[in-house]
């Protein structure tokens, strides 16, 4: 038996009647509400607030959309994943900068202190290209003694053969035909002259690691020459422990040419013990004047070298002070522009590794 259909016309009539009544009620309310000015103002404010809130919600929704992260595949145009995983790229490490080991040229400057002019050669022992050695006359391998001698040689020839940044006069030598060199000498980690009985003057020594020392034998004991890479004995001593120290007679000096006023050369070092100051004076001085100037330029240790007619200095192959006579030995300084011979560099490395001068006899 079929169900009876509900009439749809009645339902539509009821909905329309309800909506009509609601509309009449709303119209009545509005006709009573809007004629009052205060009510109209409140309604307009209320609608404005609703509008502002609607705008704020819409702007917030737009910000949320723009702040969403872009999918990786779209942002980077990455290829679709394959069966074999692609390794992650690794950043290439930046290379460590190589320190500049190139040295600087040896400086030779002309100065004046207390009215006395001089050339100051500053030898920076921390410079990797600085090497100090001793050159002998006529390219000898051993300094002049009473039993064997190579004689002397003009300073200009010594300069030309050494091909060094600085060449200067060294220690004393006798005036006889043997031209005997005074004091023990070490250069390139080898003895150029040695006597176990040596007990004279003051010794400047450079030990492993460029450690500097200055020792006056008769007051401090003999130096350990076999621990020196470079060693030169001369004198008298001028400064000791930062104070002027003059006792030439006790060191064994009696020659009037040394004790009296004359043209002089000196060598010393400051408190940091990283430089050597080689001073070639351009005026005749007493030992006291020489010591005072060496102290004024910052030396805490200093000693006199050969002088008078032996005083000589060359820089970069140019002779600044010509010697007044032939010489038997010279101080030689190499730098970055005038590099040391490879044999000298090799012997320096061996010395740092523990090799020491062989003591003759």
Image (cartoon, rainbow, N blue to C red):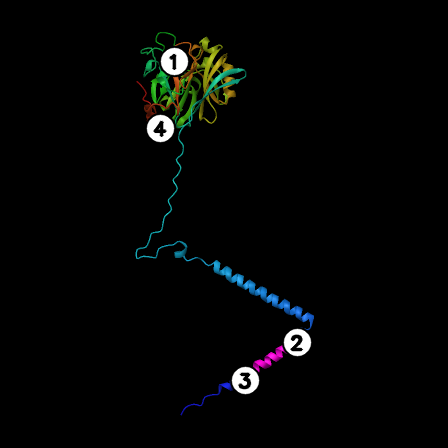
How far apart in space, not on screen, are marks 2 and 3 (Cα)?
Answer: 26 Å
| Left or right: 34 in relation to 174 | right
| Left or right: 310 in relation to 17 | left
* Disc number lying in front (4 or 2): 2
The secondary element bearing badge 2 is classed as helix
The secondary element bearing badge 4 is classed as helix
* Disc number lying in front (2 or 1): 2
- Tell me the number on the disc at residue 14: 3
* Residue 169 x, y percent position in the rendering: 41, 15
Relative to 227, does residue 78 appear above or below in the rendering? below
Counting residues from the N terminus, which is met first, the one under dot 2 or under dot 3?
3
* Residue 101 x, y percent position in the rendering: 39, 31
Residue at horizontal 69 percent and vertical 70 percent from the top = 37
Please state, as top left, top right, bottom left or bottom right, where the N terminus lies in the image: bottom left
Nearer the observer, 54 or 151: 54
Labels 1 & 3 near each other (Cβ < 8 A) = no
Query: Alpha-carbon neighbours of circle 1 within 10 Å: few (<14), some, or many (≥20)?
Result: some
Q: Which residue is mark 4?
A: 352
Counting residues from the N terminus, which is met first, the one under dot 4 or under dot 2?
2
User: Does the magenta portion include 12?
Assistant: no
Counting residues from the N terminus, which is met first, the one under dot 3 or under dot 4?
3
How far apart in space, not on screen, are marks 4 and 1 (Cα)?
Answer: 33 Å
Counting residues from the N terminus, which is met first, the one under dot 4 or under dot 1?
1
- Tell me the number on the disc at residue 156: 1
Q: Which residue is mark 2?
A: 31
């Amino acid at each position: 038996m079929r169900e009876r259909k509900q009439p749809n016309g009645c339902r539509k009539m009821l909905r329309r009647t309800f909506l009509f009544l609601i509309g009449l009620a709303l119209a009545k309310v509005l006709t009573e509400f809007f004629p009052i000015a205060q009510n109209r103002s409140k309604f307009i404010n209320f609608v404005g607030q609703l509008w502002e809130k609607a705008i704020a919600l819409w702007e917030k929704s737009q910000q949320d959309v723009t702040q969403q992260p872009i999918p990786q595949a779209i942002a980077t145009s990455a290829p679709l994943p394959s069966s074999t995983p692609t390794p992650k790229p690794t950043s290439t490490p930046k290379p460590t900068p190589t320190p500049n080991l190139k040295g600087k040229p040896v400086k030779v400057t002309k100065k004046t202190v207390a009215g006395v002019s001089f050339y100051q050669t500053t030898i920076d022992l921390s410079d990797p290209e600085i090497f100090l050695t001793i050159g002998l006359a006529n390219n000898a391998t051993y300094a002049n003694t009473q039993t064997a001698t190579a004689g002397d040689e003009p300073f200009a020839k010594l300069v030309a053969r050494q091909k060094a940044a600085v060449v200067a006069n060294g220690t004393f030598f006798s005036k006889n035909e043997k031209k005997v060199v005074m004091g023990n000498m070490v250069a390139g980690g080898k003895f150029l002259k040695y006597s176990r009985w040596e007990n004279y003057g003051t010794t400047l020594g450079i030990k492993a690691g460029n450690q500097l020392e200055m020792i006056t034998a008769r007051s401090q004991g003999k130096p350990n020459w076999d621990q020196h890479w470079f060693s030169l004995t001369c004198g008298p001593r001028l400064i000791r422990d930062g104070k002027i120290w003059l006792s030439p007679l006790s060191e064994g000096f009696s020659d009037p040419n040394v004790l009296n006023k004359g043209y002089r050369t000196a060598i010393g070092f400051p408190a940091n013990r990283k430089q050597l100051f080689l001073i070639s004076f351009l005026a005749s001085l007493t030992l006291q004047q020489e010591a005072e100037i060496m102290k004024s330029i910052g030396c805490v240790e200093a000693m006199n070298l050969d002088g008078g007619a032996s005083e000589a200095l060359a820089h970069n192959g140019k002779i600044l002070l010509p010697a007044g006579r032939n010489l038997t030995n010279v101080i030689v300084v190499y730098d970055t522009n005038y590099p040391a011979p490879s044999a000298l560099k090799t012997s320096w490395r061996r010395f740092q590794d523990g090799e020491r001068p062989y003591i003759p006899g």
